[in-house]
Amino acid sequence: MDTQTLLVYFAKASYLLAAALFILGIKRMSSPVTARAGIKWAGIGMVIATLATFAITGAHNVGWIVAGIAIGVIPTWLWGRKVAMTDMPQMVALFNGMGGGSAAAIGAGELLKFSQPGAPVPPIATLALAVVGALIGSISMTGSIIAWAKLDGRMDKVFRFGGQQAVNFIVFAASVLAGLALVAWKLDANLVIVFFALALAFGVLMTLPIGGADMPVVISLYNAFTGLAVAFEGYAMGIEALIVAGMVVGAAGTFLTQLMAKAMNRPISNVLFSNFGGGGSGE
Amino acid sequence: MIDGFLALYIFMLAAFTGKEIIGRVPVILHTPLMSGSNFVHGIVLVGAMIALAHAESPLAIAIGFIGVVLGAGNAAGGYVVTERMLEMFKSSKDKK
């Protein structure tokens, strides 16, 4: 066995360990006694997975990778340290939006790679999940940013207009159609751009009419979305840790969204599709 | 590459796991748990790192770089925020 194969085995074993730590961490976070240990377990898993990834990446673009991590970690870490306790929900929204954006970026990279002339045709499942993951990730990113802006008091108004649901539906249907066209018809770079523009726009449109008081439920839903997007992009890239961690968060997040909506006595459909909902309207 | 049906089984089992492990979460932990699971999907950083490592063209490097920055922000920010929330949770419990 050569060194490269060994390094890949090492990374994959580390991912397995990280996935186990994530699951145990979330499990512990769901009980008051063990919650504080839970986040530490998950944190250790994340550090292990990130460090082990350098075994796979080798030296190629490693400067960019290290610079990207530094730019991503340092400001968010400092900001997260000093932000007021009452501002925590919007910070979760913002960081969740970043995760969605990262998944969307992975999807964009994959789709543009496939759409290059002369590129090998990817298996249909890979392509389809890359598209679905990019769609969900994009919606989660712009939706979360709007949710952050609303909770942070940067966007107090609730934007509503006649026929809004129809417009939202058309934009959503158009983004799905563009995604279908990418999978079934033609992998074209321009179509990729149209697809992303529509998906990003839908995230904004979907979140605009929702009032501030409903935002925690919506953020939880976008959290689940990002988890699913990560899982699908993980399949497209063939990284099992992303599939497991993303899907666990996707399912836990969906369930948690239901619990939160129930605690607020509002069905999710009401939160998402009612333009006249009580809650935060008129705030 | 992962075999199709094997992948479906992984998806299915992970989904059941996700639902089961938070089965009886008390209302007071809803927001910290949301934040904690938000941190866990920061694992997307790993995918972005691998995508950037394989990038060749300037455009692919730019997209991969954005992915790494955003993924790292998700992981770091998610951790800090969750830890602070849970710290507050503990101290308020101790006072009781």
Image (cartoon, coloured by chain):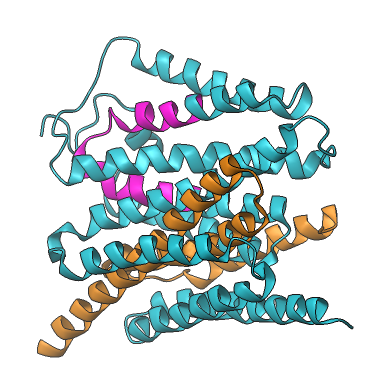
Chain colours: A cyan, B orange
| The image quarter in which residue A122 lies | top right
**Is residue B82 placed above or below B90 in the rendered structure?**
above
Instruction: Find residue B83 and report its horizontal and vertical position in percent.
Output: 29, 76
Q: Is residue A218 magenta?
A: yes
Q: Where's the N terminus of chain A, which quadrant?
A: bottom right
Identify which residue is drawn at 69% across, 24% down.
A188
Where residue A9 sits in the image (x, y, percent)? 76, 79
Give the answer, above or below, for where B59 lies relative to A245.
above
Taking A82 as reference, is B8 left or right?
right
Decide which of B87, A194 is in the foreground and name it: A194
The percent position of residue A244, horizontal first and vertical second, equals 63, 65
Residue drawn 66% across the image and 49% down it? B56
Q: A177 or B94, which lies in front? A: A177
* A170 relative to B74 in the view: left or right: right
Residue B90 position in % (x across, y down): 22, 84
Left or right: residue A33 compared with residue A241: left
What residue is shown at x 28% (from left), y 50% (from top)? Answer: A216
Check if residue B15 falls in the magenta segment.
no
Boundaries of the magenta span? A198-225
Q: Magenta part mainly helix, strand or loop?
A: helix
Which residue reaches farthest top?
A162
